[in-house]
Image: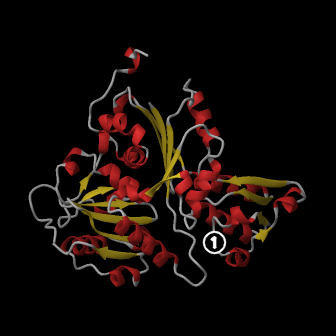
Amino acid sequence: MKILTLDIGTGTQDIFLFDSRLDPENCLKMVMPSPTMQIRHQLIEATRRRQAILLTGVIMGGGPSQWAVEAHLRAGLSVYATPPAARSFNDDLEVVKEMGIILVSEEEADRLPVPITRLEMKDFDFPAVARAFASFGVALDALDAIAVAVFDHGDAPPGVSDRKFRFEYLDRRIRLENRLSAFAYQAEDIPPILTRLQAVAVSAQGLDAPLVVMDTAPAAILGATYDPQVAARKRVIIANIGNFHTLAFRLGPAGIEGVFEHHTGLLDRPKLERLLLTLADGSLKDEDVFEDQGHGALIYNPVPLSLSGDGFGVAVTGPRRSLVKGSRVLKPYFAVPFGDMMIAGNIGLLSAVADLLPYLREPIQTWLDGNFGLPPWDKRD
């Protein structure tokens, strides 16, 4: 069985090709620039050449690409975009136009004057990934599934806070299905409000494999639970400190006991320590986070979790995990599922695929439980 997994963040896209016949160390993986970083580099080059830009495609992650668009506009250069691509920067197209971006239809885009730099916006680029593997003699054919994680704020109605809208969505999912894989969907089941996940499904159309999509932070948290030190705990806090967002779950025998989400750029170590300590003791309040420009916080189980016992206090993953390095109050443990923090999200995706696609569950779970197969030079097909 082979499953292609991609955990797409702000800085990198982490690619892991699961093969149930191999142990983890022999499965293939790549850590490559994220799609938004690739678009950013192309935008910077267009600005250097002083060329107008046309953005087409679908909604994708913003951040670095948006900053490059803004720099292009400040340089006095034109930026055109079709509506789906423009929503990468804001769901409200009036806000996009206020940025200075000129909205055009597909037909109008075909009539724009040249020279112009044309860039296709999309998070999931299967042909590019397939070419990368093919350059090493690996064909991405006969895949049993594809799983992709991206961060999705959701399409908030006009006048509704993006932060509050996303956190209310997290709350609904937890109350409906108290498990981390509740944030994963088969392509046909993606809620309409999750427009970035929907865009991934559009980009995957035509591929001969079922698609599972998931939010990045729950995927990383779920993957971290496969670290043996973390798995040994009956109750634990796991924090995913991402480049843009920090999300922490308190987990126990009954599932998710509490959660908060904040913007990493607004956190320093003392503030993050306070948030995690109050998540542990159950005193963290939603307004404590929201009024500090974060998303929010929820406590589902008021029974405190002590962080003062032997061993580590909080398990940590994510590219900005150094934010808590050396913390005496948190005693952080840097989770490394299957020996590699960078594939935590991919491992979480695999676990979610096992939940959502029961016919694939047994071989995935056998692999995740540590019962590995043959080395690559001893495959007996």
Front residue of this view, candidates 264 and 204: 204
**136 shown above or below 153:** above
Helix, strand or loop at mark 1 = loop
Residue position marked by numbered label 1 in the rendering: 91
Question: As rendered, which of 214 and 121 lies closer to the eye?
Answer: 214
Q: Quadrant of residue 276?
A: bottom left
The quarter of the picture where residue 95 lies is bottom right
Mark 1 surroundings: few (<14), some (14-19) or many (≥20) residues within 10 A: many
Q: Residue 213, can we see it?
A: yes
Residue 332 appears left or right of 349: left
Left or right: 232 in relation to 369: left
Which residue occupies the extreme front position in the image? 359
Where in the figure is residue 247, as x and y percent of width and height? 37, 65
Estimate the x, y position of residue 206 in percent, counting from the top left. 66, 42
Q: Amino acid at mark 1?
A: Asp
- Between residue 7 and residue 167, name the one nearer to us: 167
Residue at 43% from the left image edge and 16% from the top image edge: 381
User: In the rendered view of the protein, which quadrant contains the N terminus?
Assistant: top left
Residue 62 in sight from this viewpoint:
no
Where 343 sits versus 195, above or below? above
- Residue at the far left: name it: 310
Q: Residue at x 63, y 71 (%)?
A: 90
Q: In the image shown, does 185 or 48 lie closer to the viewer?
A: 185
Residue 22 lies, with reference to residue 153, above or below; the image says above
- The number of discs equals 1
Q: Does 98 sit left or right of 176 as displayed?
A: right
* Residue at 30% from the left image edge and 81% from the top image edge: 285
Where in the figure is residue 96, as x and y percent of width and height?
A: 69, 74
- Dividing the picture into quadrants, the one containing residue 251 is bottom left
Q: Is residue 355 left or right of residue 163?
A: left
Q: Residue at x 78, y 69 (%)?
A: 103
The percent coordinates of residue 328 (x first, y second) are 17, 64
